[in-house]
Amino acid sequence: MSARSIDAVRSALGAGSLIPYLGPGVLALAGKDCPLPASPEQLVAKLTAQASVPHKIRNNLSAAAQFIENFKHRKTVKKVMSEAFAPEVSPTRLHWFLAAQPKLPLLVHAWYDALPQRALATRPSWGMVQGVSQSEHFGNLVHYFRPDGTRVGAGTGAASAAEGMPPAIAPHESAQWATLLYQPFGSVWPAANFLVSDTDYVEVLTEIDIQTPIPEPVQNIRRGRHFLFLGCRFANQLDRLFARQIMKRSSDKHWAVLPEAPTRNEARFLAEQNIERIEVPLAEFTAELAQARAETNGAWLAAQH
């Protein structure tokens, strides 16, 4: 591992200028026996085990979810997704490490599990913003939630009332949170919101170029900050598109822990976004980062005596 890279990541993290971006691969840190799907391939296998879909789309998560939604109803998709991410799993070392950082303005979690929420529960001031399906919440692109899972009315009074919610408490209660957890694809907790089918994505992608689906607090926080991609792959066009739009107008320097050789599309994306590839396993990177941080804290404490 490049000492220069780890020093740069550690420095940015300590300064609050780094935004961790977690993908499904982070669940590999939970061990081989982790019951949660740790990749789109594992998740689509769970979906197709509950409902038969045409062979040609059996390995395509969004297409398989769309087929089930069309022929078995949206409730079936939500039920299977909820069951897939229902098992109680403790946060990994990486989740705990990130949740313990004094300065963590934004954490992006691009998967459906609730491990980040469980780790962040130890923080005094935080909240969530999650992408929601237009099929279930027409007219809403995101919902905001407090740490206890209660929803914050973050839209207009009319929009909130239409869904049986009280008018907004403030323009954005989230502005008072020290840490914002952003889950663009939704999450199993607290309300089982999932963006997973083709229709879900079409509704978002029609406006993502003008940033409408990206929550305003996220747009504000990301300015001038770096991103650190952990457990992410960019071989899929959808993953690249979301990452690109979430990163927009941020810093011009980022990192990605990617031990596997990148595909041609991934390599092009990394170069385009100036994302430096850190070629080590995620577990090793996490251990190195945590150790480096502990040594820094130890040196600081020693200097006080």
Image (cartoon, rainbow, N blue to C red):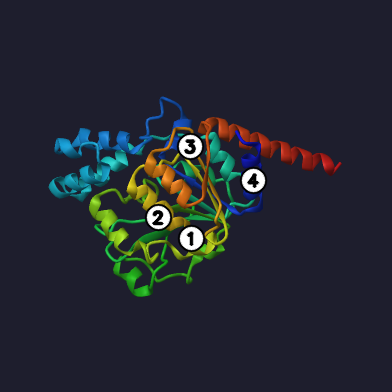
Q: Which residue is mark 4?
A: 8
Give coordinates of residue 151: x percent, y percent: 41, 59
Residue 72 at x, y = what percent?
15, 45
Q: Note whether residue 288 is visible.
A: yes
Is the residue under label 2 in contact with that under label 3 (CB below 8 Å)? no
Residues packed near mark 3 inside 10 Å, few (<14), some (14 to 19) or many (20 plus): some
- N-terminal label among 1 and 2: 2
Q: Earlier in the sequence, mark 4 or mark 1?
A: 4
Type of amino acid under label 4 = Ala
Of the numbered discs 3 and 2, the one sitting upstream in the chain is 2
According to the picture, the residue beneath numbered tag 3 turns out to be: 258
C-alpha distance separating marks 1 and 2: 11 Å
**Residue to which mark 2 is pinned:** 130
Residue 52: x and y in percent read 15, 36
The residues tagged by marks 4 and 3 sit, at their Cα atoms, a distance apart of 17 Å
Q: Indicate the amino acid at tag 1.
A: Val
Assign a secondary structure to mark 4.
helix
Looking at the picture, how far across and down is residue 31, in whole percent?
45, 27
- Which one is in front in this view, the residue at disc 3 or the one at disc 2? 3
Residue to which mark 1 is pinned:
218
First in sequence, mark 4 or 3: give its number.
4
User: Is 286 left, or right, of 117 in this rendering?
Assistant: right
